[in-house]
Image: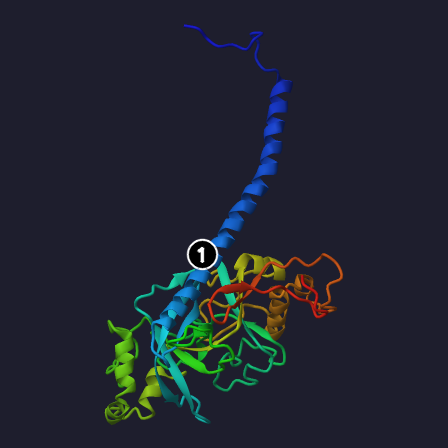
Amino acid sequence: MNISRTPNGRAFTLTELIAVITIIVILLAVSIPTFRSTIAASDSSNVETQLRLALLSARNAALHSERGADTAAVFTYQPGGKTNILICEQVGTFRDRSDPGSSVDRDVFVPVPAFEPVQLTAGWMLSGLVPAGTLPTNSDPGWYEDSADRSFDTDQRNWVFPETEFFDARTVDDGGNRQTFMIRFVGGVGSVAVGDDREALILSPRATTIGRDRTPFEDVRVDATADLSRTVRQALNNRSYLLTNQGSNGGDPLTTLFGDVSGDTILARTVEQIALYKASDLANGLGIKLNRDSGIFYVYDAVAPEIDGRGDSAEFHTRLRWWIEGNTTAARNNSDDDWIIQDDDDRPVARLYTVQRYTGVLQPVPLLDFAGANR
């Protein structure tokens, strides 16, 4: 049997082995960052595709619905780092009396059974842009009203996060702490509802039977029905029966069941710009630690939206806005010295998008400074 040998029959010297190992280390040092960059780019592309799919699904549902029956891509968040997008349809409208000082007509949306929720890759987050002067200026019931541990500077534009699970699910009337944003599509048309400032209520039943043993919850079991759309429509059309059967509870049964006060609903409003980013990038950019259990900057087991140890939460949201919009230097240093970018210190990471009005296609938004120059 022949055994292969080196031409001169000798083994590698120690110097030669060190040289080979050095070359291998250099090749790895060069290739690993490239490999990581490739993986990151692929991950980002996949998440954007998931977002596009959700928006096109919501638009497709609108095209196949009747006039007046709008649809929406509704953004929710599950503690642990999971962002979900629900494809929902409007099933009715009623007078919401959650605020004792006033009442308002609000549309009710439920998930469309034909569309599974779209779940983004773990760790990816979405925020929605709210123009200055839009959010409530006090803690009265409303969309993203101030809570004891979470507030905004309402004179500035803000980027809001889906606050869908930071509430007390053990109570039937803590729905005021649940809010989010959505992209709404006009029923029968399929266009984006641009400029629509109406608030809507999204049915998202609490995953518990606590409190469902009394009227009107025992009559309308939104947590146990096989057809949520039908159950809600029947309730909206039978308010007189629900009033008669209200017993000693008093109040308006539809508001109790579906109003902003209900723990089974999420108050939502359409936005025209959204931001996509990784929670880890946000943490690095702001120099913060994410809450270990929630996976984001909210306290996990809070019974109301609470920013995790950030001091002045209005100031925190200002820094969040700077970071999302590309002014990463100011966000990191907590210094709004000058928005006009004069050097290359900023490292924009978040991706900003709008949705094309007539096609529902996701469109990137270029970052701009106040001088109007493209970033």
Which residue is at the far top? 1
Observer-nearest of 348 and 286 = 348
The residue tagged 1 is: 121
Decide: is 32 above or below 280.
above
Name the spot of residue 190 as percent of width and height, x first.
41, 72
Q: Is residue 82 left or right of residue 340?
A: left
Secondary-structure class at tag 1: loop
Observer-nearest of 12 and 87 = 87
Q: Quadrant of residue 189?
A: bottom left
Say how the picture is coloured: rainbow
Residue located 56% across and 82% down the image: 134
Check the picture and name the quadrant holding the N terminus.
top left
Decide: is 21 above or below 220.
above
Name the spot of residue 369 as percent of width and height, x first.
69, 67
Name the spot of residue 76 as percent of width and height, x first.
43, 68
Q: Is residue 70 left or right of residue 289?
A: left
Check the picture and name the quadrant holding the C terminus.
bottom right
How packed mark 1 is, by other alpha carbons closer than 10 Å (few <14, some 14-19, many 20 or more), is some
Decide: is 12 above or below 213.
above
Residue located 59% across and 82% down the image: 133
Name the spot of residue 248 as percent of width and height, x first.
27, 93
Residue 221 can be seen, yes or no: no
**What kind of residue is marked 1?**
Thr
